[in-house]
Amino acid sequence: MGNHSAVTEFFLVGLSQYPELQLSLFILCLIMYLIILLGNSFLIIISVLDSRLHTPMYFFLGNLSFLDICYTSSSIPPMLIMFRSERKSISLIGCALQMFFSLSLGSTECVLLAMMAYDRYVAICNPLRYPIIMNRILCGHMAVWSWIIGCLNSLLQTTMTMVLPFCGNNVIDHLTCEILALLKLVCSDITINVLIMTAASIVLLVLPLLLIFISYVFILSSILRINSAEGRKKAFSTCSAHLTVVILFYGSALFMYMKPKSKDTKTSDEIIGLSYGVVTPMLNPIIYSLRNKEVKEAVKKVLSKHLGLPKT
């Protein structure tokens, strides 16, 4: 425990084996971060300003955009500093805070995507009762519980990780204070931590993904029963953006947290971690803007009203 107390900072050396890429990664991540801030902020503003978007679907989308802004803001700015700094260090408290926010927001997104899938299920499979079922109170409760579950999971895992002895090991072979990378530095038994992490992965990754899959089975079944081709196309277009985001998010998340230990490779972990933390939040507003007719129309309306641009 004396050695544990001596660890007051950590050194993040992710991708340090490629020093010639540091400047390129800095510029690339900075550009993507600015796109994340602008794209998601614009999507939130559009959802608030256009009354046609005051629906449960865009309420959850606004939550998702705000979550992506918070998630990337907890990891990308420190990462940018690390790329340009010779002393790539972070304090013990700073590392714990970064781990808490990234894990809580990532966990919240898992639950939130499942909530969005349920919203699409009700909208397509039970359209007549959709306004009654997905009322404001239920939507508010679903969103709040998504955040609460994510924060509680993160608080438990972060606390149980940071109280472990590191015995002087303070070099994290990762771009951020990621829990899997940090557990590799622990010099005591981490069986309980692994069990809790496995249980959390099942509850927050596998179960929401299973609920999403079941929802889309019913959605696909309902779409195929629609007589007109135009009706089928319209119904599917309302789900395609969400389905694309789910594939991107869960694909990288499952690879990071559920892959067999025998396939651990340092470089692939860092690249997938970068994709999980930067690329996916950047693509979310782009996907919803390009694949959603209502968002396109709302953008045109807001631009023409507030900037004086002609409607096209």
Image: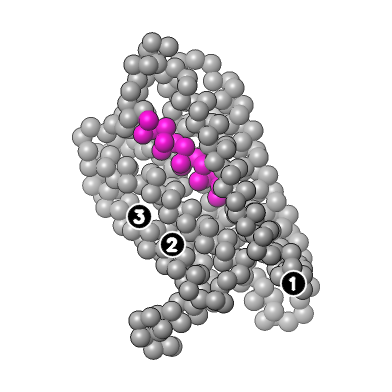
Q: Nearer the viewer, mark 3 or mark 1?
A: 1
Q: In terms of image quadrants, where is residue 203?
A: top right
Q: Is residue 289 visible?
A: no
Mark 2: few/some/many CA within 10 Å (<14, 14-19, 20+): many
Which segment did they paint magenta? 93-109
- Helix, strand or loop at label 1? It is helix
- In the displayed orientation, state which residue is furthest to the left: 86
Marked residue nearer the N-terminal end (3 or 1): 3
* Residue position for label 3: 33
240 to 143, vertically: above or below: below
Report the Cα–Cα distance between label 3 and label 2.
11 Å
Q: Which amino acid, mark 1?
A: Pro
**Of 138 and 72, which appears nearest the observer?**
138
Q: Position of residue 177 (x, y in %)?
A: 40, 34
Separation of residues labelled 1 and 2 (CA atoms):
28 Å
> What's the residue at 51%, 67% (across, down)?
288
Q: Is residue 77 left or right of residue 125?
A: left
Q: Secondary structure at mark 2?
A: helix
Q: Determine whether 96 is above or below 190 in the image.
A: below
Q: Position of residue 301 (x, y in %)?
A: 46, 82
Residue at the spot of label 1: 127
Residue visible at 37% across and 63% down? 38
Point out the frontmost of discs 3 and 2: 2
Residue 287 higher or lower than 5, as above or below: below
